[in-house]
Image (cartoon, rainbow, N blue to C red):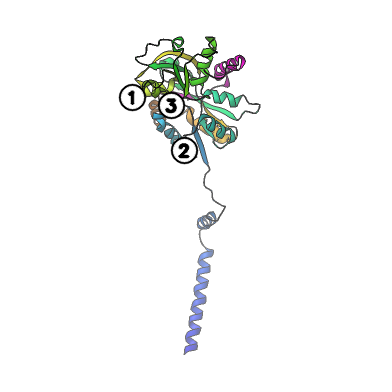
Amino acid sequence: MYLNSLHKLSRLLILGLLFVALVACNKPDSEVVDIVAEEPGSSTEQPTIKLAMSAAFVSEAGIDTYKSVTDYLSEKTGLKFEFVTGFSYSTINTMIGNGDMDFGFVCGLPYVLDRDLPTPRVRLVVAPVMKLDIYNNRPKYFSYLIVHKDSAIKTFADTKGVHYVYNDEFSNSGYNMPRAKLIEMKETGGFFGRVSRSGSHEESIRMVATGEADASAVDSLVLDYDLAKNPVYAEQVKVIEMLGPAGIPPLVASSKTKPEYFEAVRKVLVEMSDDPVGRAILDSALVDRFEVVDDENYDDIRRMKRLAEESGFMEIR
């Protein structure tokens, strides 16, 4: 009896194994693909495309605008974008040049410096065109020379001997343009009483507004935005001169960025103004549209940089 039971159990076990094998052999193909996809080294996850910002078309108060643009690109292209900020001009420029960042909203001066290398490390993608009338519907902007609203200073010449603050040596509006102005004024022997570095246009505005500095040259796009959206310090300063215009801070791509990514981003941004969601993002940033621009748009920045090099006046003082 015991042997009969053992034989029956063995037959049941064999039948069970055969059934399991039969089911496994007839699994749908999609299930087999899923299993294979989970094997180490076979992941099909999309690469992350990194978009950085060091200088662009709104102030730090509007930092969410760049996140909105990044999310918009992800949605419209089906690619995975990540927004990166918090680094200096020079660090962002190096990261884009090395291909550690795929795209970047940068200042026009760093663009020119990289573009004019024997082997350029960046490519122009698009540039914004602002809505305010002073920009004349062109991809240009200005450097605003600002002082406290109650200051008696009326012109650039009146800032002789004062405490001047700038944001960054690689800034076109904060350094390159006022430096060129000093050269044109033949004031290269020491014009200001004191010169300080603030680290950002926003900090320069705050320092002038609170009396910690007497004057500064700041990005017109930053002050425009703060006057409209974040006026705490912006309303405490006044513009006494406008320097420029000059080529507006563009969006660039690393020369190592894949061509298909480059074309996808350019297409989405150029068409952004015709899409209701995109239009709302642009309106919030005081931008009319993004458009494709030529390298010649930045020749005015080159001229001012060359003026400093030829005169030997590289450091504001």
Query: Disc 3 or 1, which lies upstream in sequence?
Result: 1
> Element at badge 1?
helix
* Residue depth check, mark 3 versus mark 1: number of the one nearer the observer: 1
Residue 285: x percent and y percent?
A: 40, 26
Q: Residue under circle 1?
A: 232
Q: Residue under circle 2?
A: 74
Q: Is residue 137 visible?
A: no
| Whole-number angstrom distance, CA of label 3 to CA of label 1 | 30 Å
In-front residue for pair 259/3? 259
Residue 175: x percent and y percent?
A: 51, 20
Q: Residue furthest right?
A: 118
User: Mark 1 and mark 3 in contact (Cβ < 8 Å)?
Assistant: no
Query: Disc 2 or 1, which lies upstream in sequence?
Result: 2
User: Which amino acid lies under the numbered mark 2 shown in the image of this protein?
Assistant: Ser
Query: Disc 2 or 3, which lies upstream in sequence?
Result: 2
71 vs 106: above or below: below
User: Which amino acid lies under the numbered mark 3 shown in the image of this protein?
Assistant: Ser
Q: Residue under circle 3?
A: 273
User: Which amino acid lies under the numbered mark 1 shown in the image of this protein?
Assistant: Val
> Element at badge 3?
helix
Q: Is residue 301 visible?
A: yes
| Whole-number angstrom distance, CA of label 2 to CA of label 1 | 34 Å
For label 1, count other residues whose C-alpha is less than 10 Å away and answer few (under 14), some (14-19) or many (20+).
Answer: few
Magenta residues?
288-317
